[in-house]
Image (tube, coloured by chain):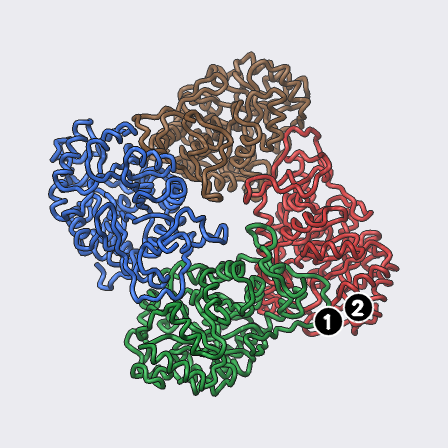
Chain colours: A red, B green, C blue, D brown
């Protein structure tokens, strides 16, 4: 890491880019097609504005929250990513440990280099298991059992990445997964031979709502859907027993011109309310972004690329630096805005230029 | 063609540009006046966003459709262009053959180098005849008879290009049609002497709604109007017996600052519904663009410049590469969005930033 | 003039710029303050789109119209500008002659180099007299009498330039009116000594609505107000006996951040209708711009800077080239749009991106 | 100062930038985080347009107004800034003197280099005291007594800067307050030791609405809140006895992505009306900006950075140059718009592009 301490996540991005070869960077930074989905996430956040409250007293702000029974020191989870071994030899182990020590949660991909059991051991009660369905229903069931036994505190079913995406910048850069990277969790389940196929990905099953219902019956703990963007899907997911939703467009990595996840969040909150945890994933790069997402109705957010920048730069400590910067920025912004705790953040904190008025109040924060 | 396989139509555009002289490129790429019409088509498509559905199951997506009785492997037709001989010696023959082999349709201009009968022979049941009215009513009638006899499966009456346009970039580049290019179809009809006039174009007749009615009575097969942008014109066209409409602004080649065809489509669908085939033409450059057009109400789209890039690069095979890329992109986007077939695509697939809501439901897709 | 014939007004602008010194160009091109008013005029026109009609038949389009009893070959008048001697020795004489020969009207400033009587002689029935009020009521009255006697067919009272403007780019360029330029009309009236003051401008009187009423009583011919932007002012002007209005922001030369005149036109048409001639002035640079203005409700438009480009390049012939280009572009655009005459142009010709619908129909064109 | 007289505040900005080291400039120009708050203030002003009235007669415009009993020669106050000693050895003394001589008011920060009593002596009846709360309630009370005794004509309670901000560009530039700068006012009150801490700032108290009520009871003169952005806060402030509000986002220096103060003003005026003086602070750079703010409902505006540019360039005279330029620009714009006095400026002077109509009339200017 540079000798000058990073002041923002963008600083870490620059340093991380400089630290790795162009092909690996292309894989990390790239997305589907022309990458309008990536740009859209960032622009959607840029186009809302914060409105502080005056004279709220108090000389501190608490960023703590609880998501599905787990206490977090800030409303930030680590989105499932893979293969983290590209960026640091300790890969998911370092990430899990960082989550534990920083009071976050690591959502661990099915496609890890290390096996889930080992990862989960590094962060007791702070690992969620993210499920990709490979091979057959039997192996999927075995995955759930393995995850439960290893102590996963929640199951995250990704619904937006059953099919390989057209990641053009990655292809153009000639990226290939190096041979020393394995699929540790899959190997532990006897799925495939544990090595990464030439194209970097194994075939996945295309899941249906019926599959969700079956998984719901089998998995006893909290279950979340990741990749929901449509309000009707959000409702159906909740009706099917999902305990929470991760509003995500996969960071613009699956579908070009995909709707920004912030807009999807807004429409979903208006449609189904906020009775279950809603997590926003996509484009969050600062503490003020977190406030925007929470004010729009999210209970917490996920970061993906940013913590990989930290991982690449300094392993566990780098991931913690990312979380620590976000914590510092979030706390600062809350204090500037007169918010003592996350429950104070609501639609009144945002001003939407389109209407030059406050956003529609699809929900009410604590104070009202 | 470059040794690296193209990943997008934009790759083919760059390669095609590099493969020809500046004046020919100016003719191919240019448009009317300041070319705001060209830019508008692209920007209108860029300003809508896709919203995928979750958990739709299924491991494939069919891009097949039927337009006026012809089965297509993807909802893409080849718009009438001329003179294709500028780009490849096999000109319209190659294009027709590519349409046949790729399961598309070639809409063959009146202004072809080869004569329509020869072209149609290369793609039985897959050539439509596009009519420009030259000379007099008698010659027009003869054109229809010729086209019918040659096996044209539909007649496309272009209504937006009766008058020469002010194509400034083309003029500035000093473009002239080379002397070895002929008007084969016109020659076969005895219109003019078959050679291309100095200004590259013969005088056309300005058609009226009465002409349409006469043509409608004479032409027994399906008849479409190309170049309709106004909702009232769309209604009148259908009332006058048009079996379908091609919503087109001639790729921005006729009128500067012309309304983007995507916006015109939206207003036309709202006004006349979707009982007849509506084809969108203008600015489509990717599979996600196709989905946007279909979600906005089109049954299929036409491409013009893109297939000429392929033709210039590799004749028939190049045109097929363009269709194949679009097919691949469309199928990928459909799978990412949870759409098993084109009928699944509807207004709910789009999010419009202006209202941050779904587009008005001017029509309902299959599922509802 | 360049050996290559200009294809657009922008071509003439470039050539004119190259033909004169930087300070004179700064005076010609510049405006008030940061020149947002200049940019606004252009952007407002750029943000509306044209919607053609299909199958209107007819092989020609007439651009003729009649404004206050004068037949024009195209709906374009030459706005009052001064001092034209900066650009060509024949100055206003050349402009007047060009107006006559091209079937336009020259609105002749009070601040001309040649005296109005001489100018009017060059273009019988085609000169309007634009009034700036200098000195006192007596001299103003004398101006009217002089203009009437010289054959001015209308009086244009400018209401937006009683005070010197902050033209920063002009000041920075060190522009000064050369000593060989005189105020011929003022001299003929005995106002001042006929020489141009050091700051290039004499003190004007600030006029009131009472002044207008007095002028209205004294001037027997048609009277127009130039520089009206507010709908209430437009109404009051008409109520006070104005026969027409020139909706103008003085080309952005008087007030920075002034509302684009196209927007003002739209609001004025909505407020007072179109019973009297409404002329739009500001930012018109092409035939499609003219259609936009007419579709928004104007009966004709004025150009200022563009004809001075022509004047600088080639005197009378240069002004005619500008009018001829606009005529050619307008006729072309009308034919492309299926408009046989100016009365066919109405609100339906425009699409407004903000609402993705047609503009509100504040008025009806001939066909409805 | 440059030998060429500045024509705009932007000229002074350039000259000031060139006159100081990069770190000091970073402190002066910089803001919080990515500095979107700074850009937002400027863009919000840029996105409204001015609409002049015609034929209002009168050959002059008065920019005079009265704010809380003090007569001003133009509706511009000097916002509290510190430490002014960075820019000129005479610091706040020069600023106060400039305010006095130019008919403005200097709002003097708690964090001055010179002590308030000395500053106030330089501008009798033209200094307001801006309060930051340090140390304890006792010291705050002592501050008020000191300010009252020294002749402060109003108290300004800043409510948006209790906590240090993340000023990244300032940090990156390595800015530190030089050791020869003191906290004269604080020293005079026995708060701290009068030296500036290493981080350039002492810890402040976080104030509450109860604190406001207590201050309100203790301070007998007019009291304003500075930093209000929320309409409900504005109402509560007035209900709590505030005599006026300064709508400010601290020039984008405290919170990134903070709502532009112009938008906040608009919403506050709509919510609480204009019965008490409303001052806009943030982004004002010209006379037309002042008109925009007043038309949006402000009674006057504050400038911060601009007068520091003047101070840095030429001490008292430089500050006066800034005020003089604004006066000149404001008067010019009023005359161009037909406004004889500030009371003539109202919502009808603005055109809002979003609705292409006049802004909602949340209030009425004098004439109606």
Residue C268 x, y percent position in the rendering: 38, 41
Residue C169 visible to an observer of this rendering: no
Residue C135 x, y percent position in the rendering: 19, 28
Residue nearest the observer in this picture, B79 or C6: B79
Residue under the point 73% across and 72% down: A203
Instruction: Confirm or deny contact between disc 2 and disc 1 (CB under 8 A).
Output: yes
Asked if marks 2 and 1 fall on the same chain, the answer is yes
Query: Could you classify mark 1 by the number of other residues whose Cα lies within 10 Å: few (under 14), some (14-19), or many (20 or more)?
Result: some
Residue A237 visible to an observer of this rendering: yes
Tell me if residue A2 comes above or below residue D14 in the rendering: below
Tell me if residue B49 comes above or below residue C108 in the rendering: below
- Mark 1 highlights which residue? A202
Q: Secondary structure at mark 1?
A: loop
Query: Could you classify mark 2 by the number of other residues whose Cα lies within 10 Å: few (under 14), some (14-19), or many (20 or more)?
Result: many
- Mark 2 highlights which residue? A186
Which chain hosts label 1? Answer: A
Residue nearest the observer in this picture, D52 or A52: D52
């Amino acid at each position: 890491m540079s000798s000058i301490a990073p002041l923002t996540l963008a600083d870490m991005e620059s340093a991380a880019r400089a630290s790795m070869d162009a092909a690996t960077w292309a894989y990390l930074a790239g997305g589907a097609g022309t990458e309008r989905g990536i740009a859209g996430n960032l622009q959607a956040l840029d186009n809302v504005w914060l409105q502080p409250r005056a004279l709220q007293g108090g000389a501190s702000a608490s960023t703590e929250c609880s998501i599905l029974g787990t206490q977090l020191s800030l409303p930030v989870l680590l989105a499932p990513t893979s293969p983290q071994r590209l960026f640091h030899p300790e890969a998911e182990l370092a990430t899990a440990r960082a989550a534990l020590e920083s009071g976050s949660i690591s959502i661990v991909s099915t496609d890890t280099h290390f096996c889930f059991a080992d990862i989960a051991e590094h962060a007791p009660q702070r690992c969620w298991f993210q499920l990709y369905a490979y091979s057959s229903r039997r192996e999927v069931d075995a995955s759930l059992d393995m995850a439960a036994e290893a102590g996963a505190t929640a199951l995250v079913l990704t619904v937006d990445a059953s099919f390989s995406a057209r990641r053009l910048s990655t292809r153009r850069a000639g990226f290939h997964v190096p041979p020393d990277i394995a699929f540790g969790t899959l190997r532990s389940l006897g799925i495939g031979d544990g090595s990464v196929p030439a194209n970097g990905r194994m075939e996945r099953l295309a899941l249906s709502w019926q599959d969700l219902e079956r998984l719901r019956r089998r998995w006893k703990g909290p279950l979340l859907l990741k990749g929901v963007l449509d309000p009707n899907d959000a409702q159906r997911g909740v009706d099917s027993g999902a305990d929470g939703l991760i509003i995500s467009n996969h960071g613009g990595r699956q579908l070009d011109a995909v709707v920004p996840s912030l807009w999807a969040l807004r429409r979903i909150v208006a449609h189904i309310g906020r009775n279950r945890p809603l997590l926003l994933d996509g484009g969050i790069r600062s503490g003020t972004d977190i406030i925007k997402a929470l004010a729009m109705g999210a209970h917490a957010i996920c970061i993906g690329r940013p913590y990989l920048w930290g991982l690449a730069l300094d392993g566990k400590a780098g991931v913690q630096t990312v979380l620590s910067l976000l914590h510092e920025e979030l706390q600062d912004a809350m204090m500037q805005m007169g918010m003592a705790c996350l429950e104070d953040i609501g639609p009144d904190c945002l001003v939407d230029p389109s209407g030059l008025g406050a956003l529609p109040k699809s929900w009410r924060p604590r104070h009202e």
